[in-house]
Image (cartoon, rainbow, N blue to C red):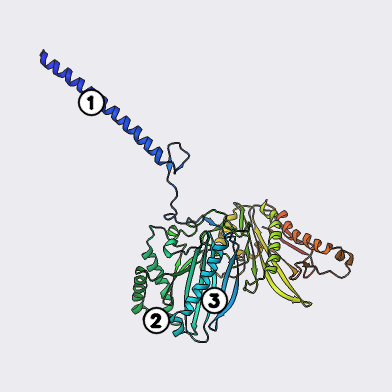
Amino acid sequence: MIIRKNIKVFLIVFLVILLVTIGVVYIYKNSQNNSMGSQVIIESVPKTIGDSPTEIIEPEDKSTTGALMQDTYENNKLTYVYKSRQKNGVEITYPEISGLNSDSIKNSINSQISDRIDRILDSNTFRTNSDDSAYVNATITSNFSDVLSVKIFVKFTDSFSKNYGVNFRLDNGNRIKIDDLFTSNAPKKNIITSSAYKSFIVNYYTEDGISNDFYTNIDSDIVNFLSEYNSGKVTEFSFTPQVIELYRDGKTVKIDMQQYHQYMTIYSKFDTNEDLYKDDYNNGKDIPVFVQRPECVYDLFEKPNSTCYIDVVLYDKNGQYDFSEGEMKIIREYRNSLYSRLNGIRETSNVYYSNYVSIERKIENNVEILVFEEEEKFAAVEDNFNDRIYNQILVEQRDVNADNTSESKIYVLDDDMIASASMERKFDIQTGNEIVERQEGEDNQDSENGNGSNNSTENTNQVTNSTSNEVNNSGNSVENTQGNSVNNSGGDIDARVTF
């Protein structure tokens, strides 16, 4: 086939134009890619670079990050005492916090708690609906992750009471709002509707079952509460590590946080990782989320390794928590000593150790004293620690209906898995010195030389150290030889358990 000359020229020109166009497009695309690449680098300055050089991870947005079941939390290094006062003849019990580095924030929080109570008592609602039986009891329900929650129970009459709440960030003393507890994408209305149904149905239970009023009123109860929430009238609330309580007109809606864990932000949202506290001590760390720790003066919970848990608290046996500064000094020194004694336990594995120490005021021989009673328990196995021990305890710890008295949840295990011992120590409140009870026939010279106190310390150290030293991780046996003596009896304790 013969191609004419003009066609040849056309094809050559077309081919040249095509090649030039392709080249221009190629160069343009490369220039755009480089430009975009530079743009990404500039924008990624505040971002976090992952393991891969090309991977860019956005900074965590705590408003959209819920809690995972394997997460843990830490208690605040904050102390408080409960005090009493009166206003217009009404008895008030309220907490007063201490331990923050910022005195201004501490004073602000304490003032806000007190002012909130005063405004309740000065309100027309209280004045017109209360009688001589009225009182106020404010308690701290949460003290973790740099937040504080205070529940205020107000009894108006024998047949009517209401709950209120004040909640704070500890980094600045500002109030926390209800929406701060949830992720920004949480279906809050659905959560509140479902929780309201579960909360309100309890009011319709009778000895014969659910009353007929339930079927008539439950829908309107829920609709009315949700309407109040939507209009911004539900502003009173408090929370624990397990439950959020919303209050409105004497009604309480309880939200089980564990059920909606992926929408709960309170464990991390205000956790600043800043040095907010004066004291530097373990007041409960490595605590699994949705576990309610008992009310106490100090919490020494920790997880030294993957199969070792230390569950230790010091609590007021009478539940008053109104210790004087002199008493608190004794308690702090006891806490420090006890914390050191746990070093041996920290080196073990496959063991759950608990020691719930009660503190009680007493008068003996006309001397005011503090009495510390230790209830030491532990369980250990050779293997399958989580299945055989810890998971059983964790289920009980996370049960919102479980008894939250000052007792270790180790009791859920079979008795033959638990070794235990007890010990008592006494301290003179005025002098701060330990009172050592001498046994008949002992050399009085030791007491005169001050050796008695040292002997007592050695014995108490041996109680805990012997526990850790004689935990046999091979699983064949666990021997717990507890101390040479117990102060209140002087008898030997030899607790042994075999797995």
Residue at (54% x, 56% y) in the render: 72
**Label whose residue precedes the other's in the sequence (3 or 1):** 1
Mark 2 secondary-structure assignment: loop
Rendered location of residue 481, percent (x, y): 75, 60
Which corner quadrant holds the N terminus?
top left
Label 3, secondary structure: give it.
Answer: strand
Q: Amino acid at mark 3?
A: Asn
The residue wearing badge 3 is 137
* Mark 3–mark 2 CB contact (< 8 Å): no
Q: Which picture quadrant has residue 308?
A: bottom right
Q: Which residue is mark 1?
A: 21
Q: What residue type is disc 2 on?
A: Ser
Gap in Å between the C-alphas at discs 1 and 2?
A: 83 Å
Q: Quadrant of residue 392?
A: bottom right
Examine the rendering and report whether any part of residue 440 can be seen.
yes
Give, as a three-letter code, the residue at label 1.
Answer: Thr
> Residue 171 versus residue 481: which sits nearer the camera?
171
Residue nearest the viewer, comparing 356 with 319: 319
Horizontal placement of 413 versus 225: left or right?
A: right
First reached walking from the N terminus: tag 1 or tag 2: 1
Q: In the drawing, does residue 76 fall left or right of residue 191?
A: right
Of circles 3 and 2, the one toward us is 3
In percent of width and height, residue 46 lies at 44, 44
Observer-nearest residue: 401 or 300?
300
Decide: is 55 above or below 386.
above
Locate the C terminus and report the quarter of the image it occupies. bottom right
Q: Is residue 1 visible?
A: no
Which numbered circle lies on residue 211? 2
Residue at x 81% of width, y 61% of height? 455
Residue 405, horizontal then vertical, whole percent: 59, 70
